[in-house]
Amino acid sequence: MRNDEVTKVAGAFLIGGILGAAVALLYAPQSGQATRKDITRTARRVRNEIGDIVEDTIDSVHDFADDVKDKASDLIDSGVDLSEKAKKEIAAALEHGQKTVEKQRKRLSEALGI
């Protein structure tokens, strides 16, 4: 599966879980005030958890990018002569990955009002 597809599937499961939890709270047999408190608590918890997930994902991508940069540097240092085109492709791939992660982080933040 491509990275975009994995991101879309993960996002769909996350949104489905949030919506399912919201529906369950709305149909729970308790007073409106208690339900509103539950919704508020759950929303805060989910927001914090998603923030942690986003940060972990960003850290993982940055670690991956650093590893790729280190490996590319090792190849260059060991005398392997990468063509200029290959260097540009590596840099472009890293930039694309970072932009994608940042875009997803912003979308999640906006969706949750963080």
Image: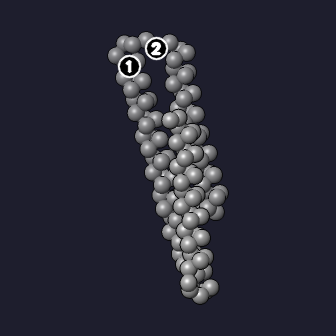
Question: In this rendering, does residue 98 appear at all?
Answer: no
Q: Residue 28's x, y, as percent?
A: 56, 79
Nearer the observer, 15 or 86: 15
Residue 63: image location, x then y, percent: 42, 40
- On the image, the x and y values in percent for residue 88 come to 55, 21
In the depicted structure, whether residue 52 falls above or below residue 75: below
- Is the residue marked by circle 1 packed among few (<14), some (14-19), or many (20+) residues within 10 Å? few
* Residue at 45% across, 51% down: 56
- Horizontal side of 90 relative to 107 (left or right) equals left
In this view, the residue in front, 14 or 75, is 14
Q: How many marks?
A: 2
Q: Are marks 2 and 1 in contact (CB under 8 Å)?
A: yes
Q: Residues within 10 Å of mark 2 (few under 14, many from 20)?
A: few
Q: CA distance from mark 2 to mark 1?
A: 8 Å
Residue at point 57%, 59% (across, down): 16
**In the depicted structure, whether residue 110 falls above or below residue 94:** below
Q: Which residue has dot 2 on it? A: 82
Nearest the camera: 78 or 34? 34
As shown in the figure, which amino acid type bears the numbered disc 2?
Leu
Q: Quadrant of residue 112?
A: bottom right
Identified at 46% across, 14% down, the residue is 82
Pointer 1 residue: 75
| Residue drawn at 62 percent across, 45 percent down | 103
